[in-house]
Amino acid sequence: MIEQVLIKQIKADLPNLPIYHDFAPPKAKPPLMILSRVGGAGHRFLERKGAYEVRVQISVWAIERIQAVQLSRQIEQSLFRLPELSSNGATVAVHDVDTDWRGMRQDFLIFEQS
């Protein structure tokens, strides 16, 4: 499962960073990371053999913008050591109005063997 590969890679560099799937629980505190599958091309070939392209979105949340940017860069550097992964664009700054947290969001493409 591709999520396990990504989490293992990130935890090697940031072992204390909480990582959640799809959303953080109500009592979660930043800094934290959220990992979600958000699409991808799926099977790239008609015969349905080989790699399955998945687009994952990683969101990092912190109290301060600088910390969110730093964490985002660390995660990106960590993930770029995986040969089957590439970014699908640059990071995007986000803000959660309800919590006043600052975040950075980035999509990655990764090939999962089917």
Image: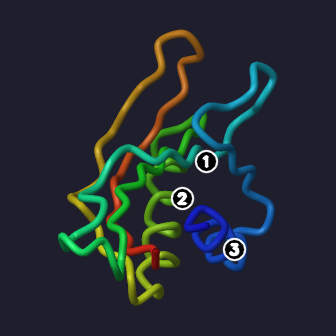
Q: Label 3 belongs to which residue?
A: 8
Circle 3 crowding by C-alpha within 10 Å: few under 14, some 14–19, many from 20: some
Report the colour scheme: rainbow
Instruction: Point out the tag, 1 or 3, that comes first from the N-terminus.
Output: 3
Discs 1/2, front: 1
The quadrant holding residue 34 is top right
- Amino acid of disc 3: Lys
**In the figure, is residue 50 to the left or right of 9?**
left
- On the image, numbered disc 1 is attached to which residue? 33
Q: Secondary structure at mark 2?
A: helix
Dividing the picture into quarters, in which one does residue 88 lie? bottom left
Does dot 3 land on a helix, a strand or a loop?
A: helix
- Where residue 23 appears, as percent x and y from the top left, is 61, 31
Which residue is denoted by mark 2 in the rendering? 71
Instruction: Give the residue displayed 75% in from the left and 32% down from the top.
Output: 29
Element on which disc 1 rests: strand
Count of numbered labels shown in the rendering: 3
How many angstroms separate mark 3 from mark 2 (CA)?
16 Å
- Picture coordinates of residue 103 (x, y %)? 46, 38
Q: Which of labels 1 and 3 is toward the front?
A: 3
Task: Estimate the x, y position of residue 68 in percent, counting from the top left.
Answer: 50, 47
